[in-house]
């Protein structure tokens, strides 16, 4: 775990090197080894100075989440936390200078260990990151991070790092005073040794020195008081109190920094245990860490198919989506032939990549030669012959079956027999589109989201005739792009569009029932959705909502049913208020001004005499999505709860604190969820009736995930 070596100059070097792991992490075994090594070095009189480093590319990647969650309750967790605090306090107060030589990243628990050294020197490794990202998984730094960081760099500098979990590069960490030096790669241990040997006087942490003052002002100083007031208000405005972790982090800093460090550490330990045991942390860790890792490792990939690497892809349609897909492909080092009906349209698609690259050049996030190489990989054209040799072609032409069929045939005429053809359709069932293909086994759906370069999710849609090999190879492409796939079976609206639409429709249904528009929008935000349902309808446009419903009606015939909310969308279209792109929808969008709810809504949708409580609206807006996700599970559109949850959080911003659409049901327990749906169904209709899958699970006491 940790190699211990004492040299003849009295320097004890503790080198992290966990066997059988690519990364060092804090877990039961490594903590035991760490505590023993610290105690030994502190007590041995032959040891004059202590150097800690790592034999791996990074220092320590953080705490092992499996170990964290395996703790048997609050007492064990609290005891473990105090043990770590005690060991790190022993290290920093033993009277011997302690230097940390960091070859790469020190994140989370890794940075907390590093902060217990008196001196931190890092390699100028461009891949190294320093930060406390715990909050992004619903946690707080429990290894002293909330106490040492603000004492080291000041409360004002520490709060953004703690509350946003930002990861800094070495030069930024140096500027903030989190690091003392950055040296050429491979010389960090020598630099740490040189510092240790130069120490002659007693070395102490600033917070253990007499007369210590927190840089930038103590908690009681007027500036910092104001800072806390603003931070509290901002946090509330951003999270609506749905996330305990950042709230607890603020409390740790406030309460911990009006005391001495040892009391502060105890305060942190209490909040830490409370946070780890919160349902929000459990849900976030499950979805954002374990499920997302499984998705990124292509858990659903048929294993027997050899991995496909990609060097050339074709993209049909250089509009908003096609241009985005070409950019992310080129960025991943894959050549992209970008085809449209006219040279101008194809060039316009490439200019999207040009604009994105320029932005990064201006911000210093990309080197000119990288930018050039990226752009050189995008070849705009109108000539199908240029697709020859592509391993994969993705069509992103107009959402029209006939046009899609035409481009499928034209592309297949020049493609190799084993090439894959993918459609980026958002609404048309894949199995139907595959009828235009001469090789439907090689036909699949790759549903990207807009804007492609910012949205990390791809919904991979398996048609009736799609082969396992095609699925495997399509997943390899998503992985090559560095994006996260979920795999769904073919059905109307697939998974993401289908469930997402229930949210906007519920918002419109509420409006038709006389609920105040501002109340509806606030309920959406209070629920934790990124945007209120009416504003979201404006974004996608009421026109599109109506168009998709018409298509559904045409396809389903007698089986089509009017859904509550649709009539509101039709009304808006009739009024010419089709959405944001027209500058008028549920909101007015004055040029250069802020959007505001259209006052005319009051006349079109008169207010009911009594307004429902906010909590009920929040529940309706969230439950309607989880119910539809459960129906997708029941119908086999989704095969795992993992895909439902990852897809909902990444795809349309379903609140992470609930862990996703199915995560919400898991959190409440299936029985409780079902019991809460029943009165909603009685009052508001069948969309709130729990599907048989949930009724069966409730009666058998089952859960979607192991408890
Ligand atoms: P868009 O209108 O911006 O672009 C479509 C492009 O296809 C245009 O440049 C057009 O000239 C080109 N085109 C039309 N017919 C063609 C043909 N025969 N051959 C070659 N090119 C042709 O549309 P978009 O928003 O990029 O959407 C494209 C596809 O992606 C649609 O199927 C859409 O449903 C789907 N999609 C869109 C979004 C979104 O948010 N816009 C999200 C996911 C999926």
Image (cartoon, rainbow, N blue to C red):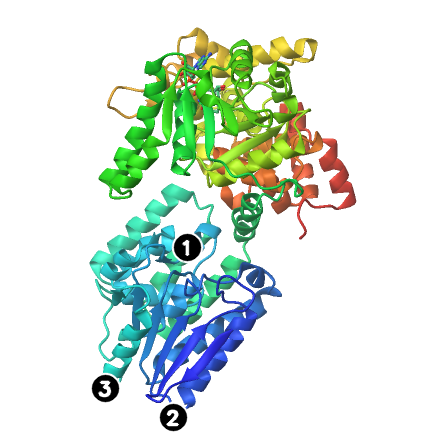
Badge 1 or badge 3: first in the primary sequence: 1
Q: Which mark is residue 92?
A: none
How far is disc 2 from disc 1 in space, using C-alphas? 37 Å
Q: Position of residue 260 (x, y in %)?
A: 33, 74
Q: Position of residue 72 (x, y in %)?
A: 62, 65
Q: Are marks 1 and 3 in contact (CB under 8 Å)?
A: no
Of badges 2 and 1, the one in the foreground is 2
x and y percentages locating residue 139 in the rendered image? 47, 56
Q: Which residue is mark 2?
A: 45
Question: Element at badge 2?
Answer: loop
Q: Which mark is residue 133?
A: 1
Q: Please give left or right for residue 144 compared with residue 428 in the image.
A: left
Among the two numbered marks 2 and 1 on one chain, the one whose residue lies closer to the N terminus: 2
Q: Given the current orientation, which residue lies at the most extreme bottom position? A: 45
The kind of secondary structure element at disc 1 is helix
State the residue position of label 3. Answer: 200
Quadrant of ligand 1: it is top left
* Label 2 Cα neighbours within 10 Å, binned few <14 / some 14-19 / many ≥20: few
Q: Which badge, 3 or 2, is on the more N-terminal residue? A: 2
Spatial CA distance of label 3 from label 2 is 16 Å
Q: In the rendered picture of this protein, how many numbered marks are placed on residues? A: 3
Report the Cα–Cα distance between label 1 and label 3.
Answer: 36 Å
Q: Residue at x 49, y 36 (%)?
A: 310
């Amino acid at each position: 775990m940790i190699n211990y070596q004492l040299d003849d100059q009295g320097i004890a070097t503790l080198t992290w090197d966990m066997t059988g792991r690519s990364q060092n992490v804090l877990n039961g075994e490594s903590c035991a080894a760490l505590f023993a090594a610290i105690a030994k070095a502190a007590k041995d009189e032959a040891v004059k100075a202590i150097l800690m480093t790592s034999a791996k590319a990074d220092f320590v990647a953080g705490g092992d989440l499996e170990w964290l969650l395996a703790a048997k309750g609050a007492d064990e967790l609290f005891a473990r936390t105090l043990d770590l605090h005690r060991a790190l306090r022993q290290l920093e107060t033993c009277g011997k200078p302690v230097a940390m030589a960091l070859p790469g990243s020190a994140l989370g628990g890794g940075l907390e260990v590093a902060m217990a050294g008196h001196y931190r020197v890092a390699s100028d490794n461009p891949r190294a990151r320093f930060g406390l990202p715990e909050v992004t998984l619903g946690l707080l730094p429990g290894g002293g991070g909330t106490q040492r960081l603000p004492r080291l760099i000041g409360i004002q500098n520490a709060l953004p790092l703690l509350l946003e979990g930002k990861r800094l590069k070495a030069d930024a960490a140096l500027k903030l005073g989190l690091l003392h030096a950055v040296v050429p790669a491979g010389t960090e241990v020598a630099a740490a040794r040189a510092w240790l040997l130069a120490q002659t006087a007693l070395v102490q942490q600033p917070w253990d020195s007499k007369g210590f003052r927190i840089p930038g002002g103590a908690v009681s100083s007027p500036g910092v008081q104001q800072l806390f007031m603003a931070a509290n208000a901002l946090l509330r405005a951003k999270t609506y109190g749905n996330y305990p972790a950042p709230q607890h982090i603020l409390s740790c800093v406030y309460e911990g920094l009006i005391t001495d460090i040892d009391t502060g550490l105890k305060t942190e330990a209490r909040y830490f245990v409370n946070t780890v045991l919160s349902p929000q942390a459990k849900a976030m860790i499950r979805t954002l860490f374990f499920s997302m890792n499984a998705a990124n490792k292509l858990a659903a990939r048929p294993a027997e198919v050899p991995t496909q690497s990609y060097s050339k892809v074709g993209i049909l349609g250089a509009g908003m989506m096609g241009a985005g897909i070409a950019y992310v492909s080129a960025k991943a080092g894959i050549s992209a032939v970008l085809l449209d009906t006219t040279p101008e349209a194809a060039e316009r698609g490439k200019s999207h990549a040009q604009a994105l690259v320029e932005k990064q050049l201006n911000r210093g996030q990309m080197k000119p030669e990288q930018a050039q190489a990226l752009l050189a990989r995008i070849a705009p054209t109108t000539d199908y012959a240029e697709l020859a040799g592509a391993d994969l072609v993705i069509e992103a032409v107009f959402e029209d079956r006939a046009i899609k069929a035409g481009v499928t045939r034209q592309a297949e005429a020049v493609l190799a027999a084993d090439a894959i053809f993918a459609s980026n359709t958002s609404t048309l069932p894949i199995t139907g589109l595959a009828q235009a293909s001469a090789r439907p086994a090689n036909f699949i759906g790759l549903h990207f989201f807009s804007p492609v370069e910012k949205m990390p999710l791809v919904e991979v849609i398996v048609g009736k005739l799609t082969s396992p090999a095609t699925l495997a190879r399509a997943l390899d492409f998503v992985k090559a792009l560095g994006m996260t796939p979920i795999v769904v079976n073919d059905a109307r609206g697939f998974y993401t569009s289908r469930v997402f639409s229930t949210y906007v429709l519920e918002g419109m249904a509420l409006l038709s029932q006389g609920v105040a528009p501002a109340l509806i929008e606030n309920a959406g935000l209070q629920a934790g959705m990124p945007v209120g349902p009416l504003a979201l309808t404006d974004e996608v446009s009421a026109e599109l909502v109506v168009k998709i419903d018409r298509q559904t009606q045409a396809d389903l015939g007698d089986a089509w049913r009017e859904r509550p909310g649709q009539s509101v969308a039709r009304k808006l279209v009739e009024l010419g208020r089709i959405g944001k792109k027209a500058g008028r929808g549920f909101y007015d969008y004055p040029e250069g001004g802020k959007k505001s709810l259209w006052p005319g809504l009051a006349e079109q949708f008169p207010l009911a005499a009594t307004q429902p409580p906010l909590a009920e609206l929040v529940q309706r807006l969230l439950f309607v999505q989880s119910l539809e996700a459960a129906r997708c599970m029941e119908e086999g559109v989704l095969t795992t709860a993992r895909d439902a949850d990852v897809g909902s959080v990444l795809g349309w911003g379903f609140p992470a604190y609930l862990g996703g659409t199915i995560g919400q049901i898991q959190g409440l327990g299936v029985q409780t969820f079902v019991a809460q749906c029943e009165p909603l169904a009685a009052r508001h209709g069948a969309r709130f009736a729990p599907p048989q899958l949930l009724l069966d699970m409730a009666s058998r006491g089952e859960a979607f995930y192991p408890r």
